[in-house]
Amino acid sequence: MDVYNILLFTLVLIIYIVTICGNFLIIMLVYYSKTLHSPMYFFLSQLSISDIMLTTDIAPNILNIVLHERTSISFSGCITQYYFFGSIETFECFLLTVMSYDRYLAICSPLHYVSIMNHALCIKSVLASWLLSCSIALILTVGICQLEFCGPNTIDHFYCDFNPLVELSCSDTSRVQMELTILCFPVIVLPFIVIVVSYTYIVLTMIKIPSFSGKLKSFSTCSSHLIVVFIFYGTLIAMYVLPNEGESQMIKKIMSMLYTVFTPFLNPFIYSLRNKDIKDALRNAQIMHYLEPLVKIR
């Protein structure tokens, strides 16, 4: 293994470890800190869970490829990886949409926020998102399984994604390609439209706030989510909605790395560094850690 592979392996390993630790820290803070027991942070903890699952589905395979330069995976293993990848990515699309609706209610209808966005609705939203995500991913996975693979069996990619798998098929792929095109609307396009409309109303409401401090406070609750949406949906739309026949395989790999590895890596930093509540919860957790022996003595 040359120096380049060693450096790349080390970089991906560090990103993977930091991603797991950072997202796990957010989950623990939301679970134990009473100040974070609100719908916004509940959804944030669900995003952290999905980020851990996504990175664990992709990163170990990347590390294996970098370590051995060329590795193999069984067809069933490849299909399984694609199914979990598709389910998690679709879930994050729906979850980010739910989070934008949560911010819309909090800023545009604050008097009705508590009664509408209650704990039961939060649980139902997450469960419905998972159910829809697994069902949609299953449709595409079954479609891929029905294809015939009789030619080359080398995937020029970091993991088993839709396009690299379909390109290996020696049968007619028009049906499964049409399924992907149709499903892109409810999974990517429609949620993105909902997010844009939600933030349009949020911006219009913020403009009407008379005090600058009030505007700043409202913006601070949305800025982190907006950054994550921009990175996540920007790469997804570029990969699956816009035509990319002329793009090189290296560009496609880099785009895939953005939303499968780097976005889960950046999310804890985006939400923790820009969020006063999480920083306060982390500071209080550290203080309680040091005070715990004194409490036990008393």
Image (cartoon, rainbow, N blue to C red):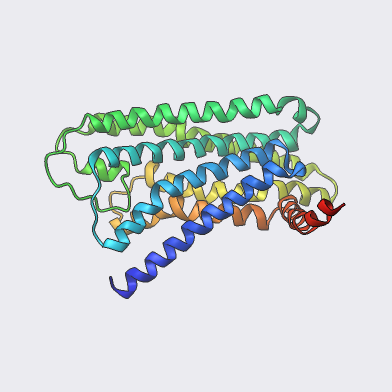
Q: Quadrant of residue 68?
A: bottom left
Q: Position of residue 25 (x, y in %)?
A: 62, 51
Q: Residue at x 57, y 34 (%)?
A: 194
Q: Is residue 50 left or right of residue 159?
A: right
Q: Nearer the viewer, residue 294 or 97?
A: 294
Q: Is residue 1 left or right of residue 93?
A: left
Work out which residue is located at the far left of the displayed protein and give it.
150
Image quarter in which the N terminus is found = bottom left
Q: Is residue 115 left or right of residue 12?
A: right
Q: Residue at x 26, y 37 (%)?
A: 76
Q: Position of residue 37 (x, y in %)?
A: 73, 38
Residue 147 vertical position relative to residue 33 in the rendered view, above or below:
above
Q: Quadrant of residue 103?
A: top right
Residue 105 vertical position relative to residue 26 in the rendered view, above or below:
above
Q: Position of residue 229 (x, y in %)?
A: 55, 46
Q: Quadrant of residue 6?
A: bottom left
Whether residue 36 is visible, yes or no, is yes
Number of marks? 0
Whether residue 200 is visible, yes or no, is no
Work out which residue is located at the far right of the displayed protein and give it.
298
Q: Nearer the viewer, residue 31 or 156?
A: 31
Q: Residue at x 28, y 49 (%)?
A: 245
Residue 247 vertical position relative to residue 221 in the rendered view, above or below:
below
Q: Is residue 16 left or right of residue 206?
A: left
Q: Residue at x 50, y 30 (%)?
A: 130
Q: Nearer the viewer, residue 61 or 197?
A: 61
Work out which residue is located at the far front of the displayed protein and give it.
297
Q: Position of residue 197 (x, y in %)?
A: 61, 36
